[in-house]
Amino acid sequence: MRLVLKLESNKDVLQSKENNSKFYGGMHGWVYNKLKNTDFSKIYFEKEFKPFCFSNLFPIEKALIKEGQIYSLIISSPNEMFIVALLSQINLEEVINLGEYSFKLKSYKPLPKINVSKANLLESETIINITIHE
């Protein structure tokens, strides 16, 4: 299952290797903090693969996060209950600080799990990039 977050930037920040590194660490910390009072509260301490991943911010032009612009971010998990637990803890308009970046959560939308069967797989050597348009 996936969760799409729409984030409004609170300030201009130029992307850099250091800022992006802080963003990824901050994003992990934000997710773990949101899960403190859920059935997933101990995943940070477990020495195994974590049941989630997240995308980069998009769309970004010229490596600049602009104040007032809306960016999207997708959190994914094969465990539907993980996303449900996360949903139960997030609040619209909350401020999310991720390293140098600062955002206000404007909206969120869970996306249902897509079941893929052999009947609807395309066999190709071409990489397919799928982008969500709303």
Image: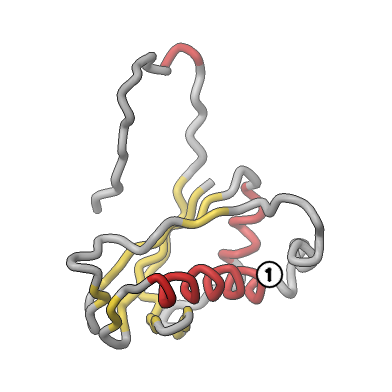
In the displayed structure, does residue 72 sit left or right of residue 112? Answer: left
Q: Residue furthest left?
A: 62
> In the depicted view, which residue is nearer to us: 62 or 94?
62
In the displayed structure, does residue 16 sit left or right of residue 96? Answer: left
Residue tagged 1: 35
From the viewer's perspective, is residue 115 above or below residue 44? above
From the viewer's perspective, is residue 126 above or below residue 42? above
x%, y% of residue 81?
A: 66, 52
Residue 11 position by quadrant: bottom left
> In the depicted view, which residue is nearer to us: 13 or 87?
13
Q: Residue furthest front?
A: 17
Q: Which residue appears at 54% of the width and 46% of the height?
A: 1
In the displayed structure, does residue 66 sit left or right of residue 99? Answer: left
x%, y% of residue 83?
A: 59, 56
Chosen colour scheme: secondary structure
Please give the count of numbered marks on the rendered protein: 1
Q: Which residue appears at 34% of the width and 16% of the height?
A: 124
x%, y% of residue 46?
A: 81, 59
Q: Which residue appears at 57% of the width and 74% of the height?
A: 30
From the viewer's perspective, is residue 16 above or below residue 113? below
> In the depicted view, which residue is nearer to us: 76 or 124?
124
**Which element is circle 1 on?**
loop
Circle 1 crowding by C-alpha within 10 Å: few under 14, some 14–19, many from 20: many
For badge 1, the amino acid type reads: Leu
> In the depicted view, which residue is nearer to us: 93 or 7?
7
Q: Which residue appears at 33% of the width and 30% of the height?
A: 127
